Structures are given as C-alpha cells and as structure tokens.
Image (cartoon, rainbow, N blue to C red):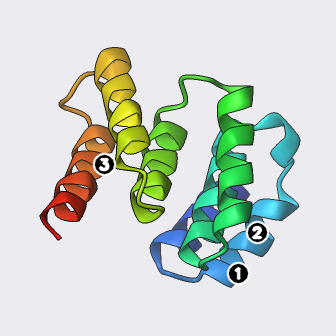
C-alpha cells in the first residue's frame, strides 16, 4: 500500500516515467486501480493505444471502476469521440451520482471540447 501511494504521489507530481516504473512494479494483474493508473500514465505520455488497452483491462477487471470510467471517458474526448465520452459520463452519474469528482472532471473536459 505504501508503494502504491508513493507511485500515485509521483503521478500527482508529474513524474510520469518514474510513476510508470513504480506502478509496473506492483502486482498489476490483481488491481484495477493499478491498471487504470498505468493507462492514465500512458495517456499523459501520449501513448494513446497503450492507454486504451489498460483502461479496457481495468474495466474488464472491475466494470464499474469509477476512475477508469472517468479516465477512459477523457481518453474518448481526446480522441474526438464525444459520444463515447458522454456515455461514460452518464454511466458515472447513474452509478455514483453527478456530485463526484470523477463526474465533474469528465463533464468539464467534455464541455471544454464542445466549446472549441
């Protein structure tokens, strides 16, 4: 758990390469949280195909994973697939409500994309 928190702190600090190494050192095959963060790091590094693979793996492991639903929705925004992003937003709302940080972050990203 301490190693996981340290890896998340690296992500928060923008140390993506180091965070990727730290996350991979954890047993990713048993944790949707770890797999989701590996996808997030790949997305931040511009490796969109790898990010998609990890988001889908996290959602396969835990279909209602709040973070994976948000981050994969953000991935869809970046890929210009606002229809899919809206679907993820709706799923977050129906599962967890519209007052969660995941909903707010994805909704803002969608809204910003629709303005531009």
For label 2, count other residues whose C-alpha is less than 10 Å away and answer few (under 14), some (14-19) or many (20+).
some
Q: In the picture, residue 37 is in which quadrant?
A: bottom right
Q: Residue at x 72, y 29 (%)?
A: 60
Q: Residue at x 22, y 45 (%)?
A: 104
Residue 17 versus residue 84 in the image, above or below: below
Mark 1 = which residue?
A: 18
Q: Report if the CB atoms under discs 1 and 3 are less than 8 Å apart.
A: no
Give the number of the disc on residue 22.
2
Residue 56 appears in the picture as rendered = yes
Please give left or right for residue 100 compared with residue 13 in the image: left
Q: In the picture, residue 89 is in which quadrant?
A: top left
Q: Nearer the viewer, mark 3 or mark 2?
A: 3
Nearer-N-terminus badge (3/2): 2
Q: Which quadrant holds the C terminus?
A: bottom left
Element marked by disc 3: helix
Give the number of the disc on residue 106.
3
For label 3, count other residues whose C-alpha is less than 10 Å away and answer few (under 14), some (14-19) or many (20+).
many
Residue 39 versus residue 10 in the image, above or below: above
Name the spot of residue 14 as percent of width and height, x first.
50, 81
Name the spot of residue 75 as percent of width and height, x first.
49, 57
Q: Nearer the viewer, mark 1 or mark 3?
A: 3
Q: CA distance from mark 1 to mark 3?
A: 26 Å
Extreme residue in the left direction: 115
Name the spot of residue 78 as percent of width and height, x first.
43, 64
Q: Report if the CB atoms under discs 2 and 1 are less than 8 Å apart.
A: yes
For label 1, count other residues whose C-alpha is less than 10 Å away and answer few (under 14), some (14-19) or many (20+).
few
Q: CA distance from mark 3 to mark 2?
A: 26 Å
Nearer-N-terminus badge (1/3): 1
Element marked by disc 2: helix
Please name whichever residue, 28 or 80, is drawn nearer the observer in this view of the structure.
80
């Amino acid at each position: 758990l301490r190693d996981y928190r340290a890896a998340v702190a690296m992500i928060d600090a923008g140390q993506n390469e180091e965070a990727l190494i730290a996350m991979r050192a954890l047993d990713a095959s048993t944790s949707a949280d770890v797999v989701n963060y590996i996808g997030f790091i790949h997305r931040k590094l511009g490796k969109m195909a790898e990010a998609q693979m990890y988001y889908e793996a996290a959602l396969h492991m835990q279909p209602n994973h709040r973070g994976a639903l948000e981050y994969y929705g953000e991935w869809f925004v970046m890929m210009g697939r606002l229809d899919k992003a809206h679907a993820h937003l709706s799923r977050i709302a129906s599962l967890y409500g519209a007052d969660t940080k995941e909903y707010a972050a994805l909704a803002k990203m969608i809204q910003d994309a629709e303005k531009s």
